[in-house]
Amino acid sequence: MEARMTLTLARVMRDGGRMAPFVVCSRGSLLAEALCEQKIPHLAIGSGLMAEGLAALRLRWRCRHWRGLLVQTFGQASVSLGGRIQRLRPRGATLLGHAFLNSPPSRNLLQGGWLRSLVAADCILCGSRHVRDRLAEHQADALTPQGPGERRLRLLPPVVDGESASLLDLSPVVAEKGGRFVFCMRESLLPRSGATLVTRAMAALWQRTDLPPWEVRLYGGGDRFAEVFDEARALGVTSRLSLLGEQDADIMKSALRQAHAFLAPGSSPEEAPATLWSGLAAGLPSIVSRCPLHEERLRNCENAALFFEDGNPQALAEAMITLMHEAPLRAELAGRGREAVLSRLPDDAARALCAFFENWYTRRGWVMQPEHVSPQEKDAPAEDEAPPADKEGGGSKHRKKDRSRSKNLSESS
């Protein structure tokens, strides 16, 4: 998720933003390959402290004449390099931001010397309230000397992952009368995935005679295969269950096309975005647990899925029966689900981030003079949330009149 967001942000900056991107990534990574293919300026470095130190020195030399520099890291692996670059430059000449999109840093890192680079940040973008709350909890004391943690930790709007966004053009099969009705689920064998909840709901459906033939297909890797299978065997539902393991993107796309409904019954606060978004993007009517993360990701889009009480197998079974019986509801949920995905596309999120970065950069007093700042940029961002993109694409309406200043901004980014 972090690599995809980095690539999307760099591409949006290159193709229309007012800040020029330069990406630092791991040598031999998929991100490095994608940056080469898309001809985005970047530096691919090896692993280890030596490689990181040399990269920091190279970047210091590259930007030695720049009055202002914004360094934004994604994920815990890049935090220390971001801090090194900031320390090598003159005091006050670098804006440093970090971003954790899906999971907060591990507890061990938050208690070690790595914390120094994290605390030095001017802003930390959080992909969920869970990430923000864990950071605030573990580093409240460290943040106190520079300002309250809740002001520095800013929520990002929910973002659909790139893999799920690519499913928007998928045409799933239509359930035929008398045919087998297929439910599918992703990341099934991970902790708190809800897979055992599904097997218990299946047991509640087993004796029903008013249902079409049905089955459940569980996809995804993890170490809970024996636990889920033993639960299904004890409940007598193994003949209706398939445990299909981790699949590549092409096979998963085919699997979603063959399904009639999608299940997202988990309760993990660090659940991968595709576990929810892929079913909605694929046009499948989705049954979703009412856990905090799902409610946050579907905020203002609650009618995009059929919610059930978290941890309640009987409620899940009732939702599954409802979908099998009501074709109009399935069609309605499929349309609303895709609308929800379209409102949270990665490109829109990247444009919103660009607008936020430009605002942040300008408010420092770099490059643009106050009389040149647009009314939107004069408004301070929300205390705990990065601003969403406007209807015209997060600042794109200012591009033409600011074209004369684009060179200066690019050189300073």
Image: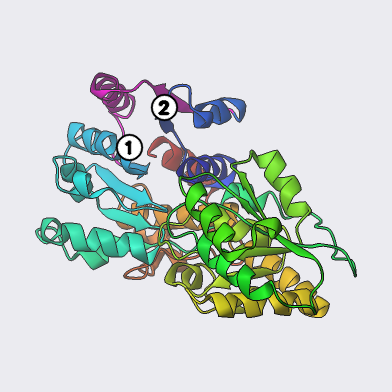
Q: Nearer the viewer, residue 170 or 402?
A: 170
Whether the residues at callouts 1 and 2 have beta carbons within 8 Å, the answer is yes
Looking at the rendered structure, the number of numbered marks drawn on it comes to 2
Please indicate, yes or no, whether residue 301 appears anywhere in the rendered image. no
- Residue 67 among magenta residues: yes
State whether residue 131 is above or below residue 200: above
Q: Residue 364: x, y in percent? A: 29, 54
Tag 1: amino acid: Ala
Seen at 72% across and 55% down, the residue is 168
Number of other residues with Cα within 10 Å of mark 1, as a class: few under 14, some 14 to 19, many 20 or more = few
Seen at 14% across and 42% down, the residue is 112
Q: Residue 148: x, y in percent? A: 18, 66
Q: Residue 155: x, y in percent? A: 38, 64
Tag 2: amino acid: Ser
The range drawn in magenta is 39-68
Residue that sits furthest to the right in the current view: 177
Question: Which residue is denoted by mark 1 in the rendering?
Answer: 77
Question: Which residue is denoted by mark 2 in the rendering?
Answer: 26
Q: In this view, does 65 lie to the left or right of 332?
A: left
Q: Residue 44: x, y in percent? A: 42, 23
Q: Which of 237 and 201 is in front in this view?
A: 237
* Earlier residue among tags 1 and 2: 2
- Residue 58 among magenta residues: yes
